[in-house]
Image: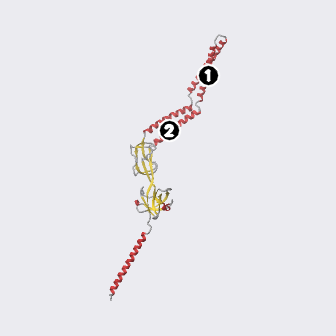
Amino acid sequence: MSHPLSNKMSRGKSGLLALGLVLLASWLGWRFWLAYQPQPIRLQGQIEAQQYAVSSKVAGRIDQVLVKKGDQLTKDQLVFTLASPEIEAKLSQAKAGEAAAGAMAQEAEKGARSQQIAAAKDQWQQAKAAALLQEKTYQRIASLHRDGVMPLQKRDEAWTAWQAARYSEGMAWQQYQLIQEGEREETKLAAREQANMAAGSVAEVQAYLADTRINSPHQGEVSQVLLRSGELAPQGFPVVTLLDMGDAWAQFHVREDLLPRFQVGTEFEATVPGLGEQLIRFKVTHVAVMGDFATWRATDTRQGFDMKSFQVEARPLQPVAGLRVGMSVLVEL
């Protein structure tokens, strides 16, 4: 006959063993359940910001660079200056051409001087007197020819001289009238347009000269200084680049099967590891109209297809302090 205490201990051990088996089965079931649960999808993007290149329309040697990396610039703040003696020489040349064209235009508007008019009148009077003398000489020689004293040749020569004097008188009269009337309206207009063209040339060179002092086109932080004082700056080469962190956004490449979650206007929360664990709310502002690249994803063991990725841009709803270009942005779906 067995002892009652021994039977009681045996039943206790059996109960503990059964409980252990139940706990083990529950844990295994929970692990299997977790293994078959869909894993959250994590998207990683990065912060981008609007960038501005500060350059000059003219080539020249850098005189001074007045900023350094990290400086916060305001719009129209002086960034760098160029030394360009060639432009200064062209400006002097253009101003001389403007002065000459202006003088020609004034001369055309005012017309001839009083002395020129008087000289033209004197030349007409002189030609008139010479024509009158030739007429009288012809009449005398013609009379002598009728009397048989003067040969026909002499009379013809006197006639020709008289006619030539008359033509000279007419030419002198026309010249006198032309000087009194002044330049034609077309000539005045041409002179005025030449003056305007010369003034335009001066304005063009002055604009180039003004572009040797380059101001910031926008507010922002200096991210790079590519040239230093004394170096040659080609036309349009960015000497300084700016980043406007007030105009920053997150950029992702999203698979096409996830695009319905990122339609324009959709809001979502994301974390920026570089700023800690705080959640930042973004709003989708742009979805690319064309896929960038493909990531192969097999749907089963027999077939598969290329899953295109599309660029998505989202901007924070509120300004985020400390945000920098290149920071990672994480989104869990």
Distance between the Cα atoms at labels 2 and 1? 47 Å
Residue 41 position in % (x across, y down): 44, 64
- 136 sits to left or right of 242: right
Q: Identity of the amino acid at label 2?
A: Ser
- Which residue is painted at 38% across and 78% down in the image? 19
- Which residue is painted at 38% across and 77% down in the image? 21
Count of labels in the image: 2
- Seen in the picture, residue 277 relative to 191 is either above or below; the reply is below
- 61 sits to left or right of 136: left
Q: Which residue is mark 1?
A: 167
Residue 261 position in % (x across, y down): 49, 62
Report the disc number at residue 241.
none
Q: Which residue is mark 2?
A: 201
Q: Identity of the amino acid at label 1?
A: Tyr
Mark 2 surroundings: few (<14), some (14-19) or many (≥20) residues within 10 A: some
**144 vs 29, nearest the viewer:** 29
- Seen in the picture, residue 290 relative to 164 is either above or below; the reply is below
Residue extending furthest bottom?
1
Looking at the rendering, which quadrant does residue 328 occupy? bottom left
Q: Dots 2 and 1: beta carbons under 8 Å?
A: no
- Which residue is painted at 61% across and 22% down in the image? 167
Assign a secondary structure to mark 2: helix
Looking at the rendering, which quadrant does residue 111 occupy? top right
Residue 11 position in % (x across, y down): 36, 83
Residue 320 position in % (x across, y down): 44, 58
- 295 sits to left or right of 129: left
Colouring rule applied to residues: secondary structure
Residue extending furthest front?
302
**311 vs 48, nearest the viewer:** 311
